[in-house]
Image: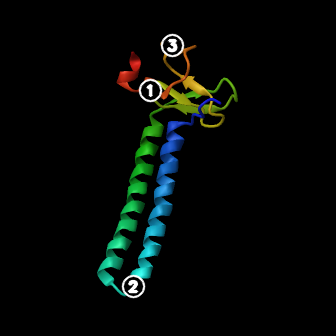
Amino acid sequence: MGVKYSNKINKIRTFALVLIFAGIIIMYLGLFFQTNFILMSIIMFLGFLAIIASTVIYFWIGMLSSKTVQVVCPDCGKHTKVLGRVDACMYCNTPLTMDKSLEGIEFDEKYNHKKGKD
């Protein structure tokens, strides 16, 4: 079976969503330590920091997403955003590239790194 690739923008958005839920769960766990005010406050603050981090990540990926190149996916025909040299379609996960030298070569996310240009 081949490796399943997904769009980088969607990966980052999913990570930010997980941070929101993790922050809420962490703060909820703080309620179990109501007898120890300092420990409860520390746990609540850690959950708050996770939610703030997700907000920063959402803002960052939104700014990054506005600068990406939009292309039409050859498989599903929908407009998708390509971030870097190689990426996957946001809808059907078809490997896409904007680099003519990588066309016809097997898809590998290492091509986005400088070491992967070999």
Q: Which residue is drawn at 37% across and 87% down?
A: 35
Find residue 58 and name its label: none
| Amino acid type, callout 2 | Gln
- For the view shown, which residue lies furthest in the bottom direction? 35
Quadrant of residue 106 within the rendered picture? top right
Gap in angstroms between the C-alphas marked 2 and 3: 60 Å
The percent coordinates of residue 70 (x first, y second) are 55, 29
| Secondary structure type for disc 2 | loop
Disc 2 designates what residue? Answer: 34
Tell me the quadrant of the picture where the C terminus can be found. top left
Q: Is residue 106 left or right of residue 61?
A: right
Find residue 100 and name its label: 3
Whether the residues at callouts 2 and 3 have beta carbons within 8 Å, the answer is no
Disc 1 designates what residue? Answer: 110
Q: Which of 97 and 78 is in front in this view?
A: 97
Q: Which of 111 and 97 is in front in this view?
A: 111
The percent coordinates of residue 74 (x first, y second) are 66, 23
Q: Which of 73 and 96 is in front in this view?
A: 96
Quadrant of residue 71 within the rendered picture? top right
Tell me the quadrant of the picture where the N terminus can be found. top right
User: Which numbered disc flags the more N-terminal residue, 1 or 3?
Assistant: 3
Gap in angstroms between the C-alphas marked 2 and 1: 48 Å
Q: Residue at x 44, y 44 (%)?
A: 61
| Amino acid type, callout 1 | Lys
